[in-house]
Amino acid sequence: MSSFQKLLEFSTNSMKPLTKEKVKALHFVRYQWDRQLQQIEMKYYDKEFLQAFNWTPDDFDMTVVGPRKCIGHFQDSYYYPCLRHSSVTDFPQCYKCVSYSIPILKCIFEPICWGDKCPDSICNQPHQVYLAFFNTIPKIGMTSEQRLKLRLYEQGADAFSIIATVPNRFSARALERNISVVLQMKESYDPEVILRTFTREIDKKVIEEKYSLIYTSIKDRFDLKCSKLHYVDVYPLDLPLRSMPILRPTLGLHNGKFVGIKGKFLIYESKGLNALRLNDMLGQYMVLNSS
Ligand SMILES: [Zn+2]
Ligand SMILES: [Zn+2]
C-alpha cells in the first residue's frame, strides 16, 4: 500500500481503496520548509474532503497529470484553494492568489517598483544579495532579508556568503544582475548541473579557494565586503549518491522508494536513482495507481 493510501485511510475511516473505476486526482499545492526550518512540508489538496493533507512519501506509485492549475494560497497556516481554478504556466499561482502576498507578480522576478506600487510586500523590504555554492559551483542570488535561509534551503545550497544588504527588492535585483554580468557568474543552472554535484563529497578546499577569488573581485569591482562563508548541511538526503539521478519529466509515471530531498529535487529509487522537480510539481495533479 502506498503512503498516499495509508494517509488517506488515516484521514477517513470510510475511505474506500482507490480503484480504476474511481480515479482521484490530488492537487499538489505546497513544497516548503516549515517556519522553524526543521523539515520540508509537502501538501496536496483533496477536493473530496475540502482539505490540504501532508504528503510524506515512502514507497509511492503515482501518475502526475496536468493541466497545471493555480495552487491557491496559504495564510496563517490555513489553506485557501484558488476559487477561479485558473490555469497557470511558469508560476504556480494566478494573479489573484499571488496578490495576497504581492500586488504585481512581475515584481517577484524583475521588480518594476521601488516598493511604491507594492507597499506592504517584499518589494518594500530589505533584501540581501548573496553568493551560494552548490558543492564547488558558485551562483549569485538575491532574496528578502527575512527569507534568506529559506531561499538557500529551497535551492539546496551547500555554502553561502552575504554580499550586501539593500533597502528594497529593486536595488537587490539591480546589484545581482550587475555582479552577474561583471563577474560572469550565473544566476541559475540547468538541473543536470546541480544533480551532478550530488555524486561528490563537498569539497571545502575548492569552495574556499573560489570564495577567496570572488571575495577579492567583489571588493575590487564593487567596493563590497562579502561576509564569511557559512556551510549548510540540513538536507534530508545522504550524500554523495552512488550515481547521478536521472531527471524525470514531471508529467507521467513515478513509482519507487523515496530516497530524500535536496533543494527542489526529490530523489527516488526505481531501477536506479531518479529525480523529480518539486517546484515543477506545484499545481500538477497526482493520480495514485492502485496496487
Ligand atoms: Zn488562483
Ligand atoms: Zn513591486
Image (spheres, rainbow, N blue to C red):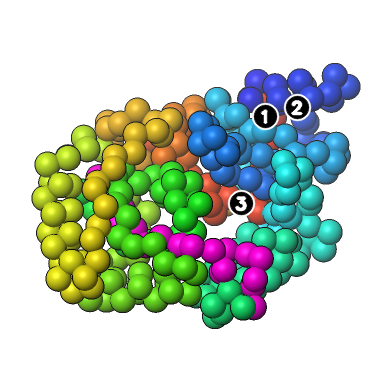
- Reading the image, the residue beneath label 3 is 282
Residue 217 place in picture, x, y as percent? 15, 67
What residue is shown at x 34% (from left), y 62% (from top)? 164
> What number is the disc on residue 153?
none
What residue is shown at x 85% (from left), y 36% (from top)? 49
Residue 158 place in picture, x, y as percent? 31, 43
The answer to whether residue 87 is visible is no
Would residue 107 appear left or right of 176 to someone viewing this image? right
State which quarter of the image contains the C terminus.
top right
Give the distance between the C-alpha atoms of the residues marked 3 and 2, in whole angstroms: 20 Å
Please tell me which of labels 3 and 2 falls first in the chain. Answer: 2
- Reading the image, the residue beneath label 1 is 4
Would residue 242 appear left or right of 82 to someone viewing this image? left
- Reading the image, the residue beneath label 2 is 8
* Magenta stretch contains residue 134: yes
- What amino acid does circle 3 point to? Leu
Residue 60 place in picture, x, y as percent? 58, 30
- Magenta span of residues: 117-135
Between marks 1 and 3 in the image, the one whose residue lies nearer the viewer: 3
3 in relation to 111, above or below: above
What residue is shown at x 42% (from left), y 67% (from top)? 166
What residue is shown at x 22% (from left), y 38% (from top)? 202
Q: Residue furthest bottom?
A: 112
- What amino acid does circle 2 point to? Leu
Q: Residue furthest right?
A: 14
